[in-house]
Amino acid sequence: MHPETHLQLHHARAAELQAEAAAHRLAARARHPRELRTRLGWTLVELGLRLAATPGGTKPALA
């Protein structure tokens, strides 16, 4: 293979890999709010269960 052709193919593949990496970084950033929302949701569920389990509606001691 001619060296110039090989170099052009190398540059094209490097550009493809950089585009894939950029797309992966964007997808990874988009996942973070969902994880926070999930943790917050489960915390609220736990709090609701604690409130429902207390006799007479007294406030539970949060640990």
Image (tube, helix red, strand yellow):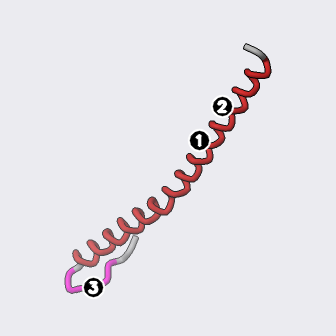
Q: CA distance from mark 3 to mark 1?
A: 54 Å
User: Quick one: 4 or 59, which is closer to the camera?
Assistant: 4
Q: CA distance from mark 3 to mark 2?
A: 65 Å
**Residue type at numbered disc 3:** Thr
- Mark 2 Cα shell of 10 Å, populated few (<14), some (14-19), many (≥20): few
Residue furthest left as drawn? 55
Image quarter in which the N terminus is found: top right
Instruction: Name the residue at 22% across, 75% down.
Output: 53
**Relative horizontal placement of residue 3, taking residue 39 as reference (left or right):** right
* Residue that badge 2 annotates: 13
Q: Mark 2 or mark 1, which has the lower sequence index?
A: 2
Instruction: Name the residue at 72% across, 32% down.
Output: 11
User: Quick one: 5 or 45, which is closer to the camera?
Assistant: 5
| SS for callout 3 | loop
Contact between marks 3 and 2 (CB within 8 A): the answer is no
Residue numbers of the magenta segment = 55-60
**Relative horizontal placement of residue 38, taking residue 20 as reference (left or right):** left
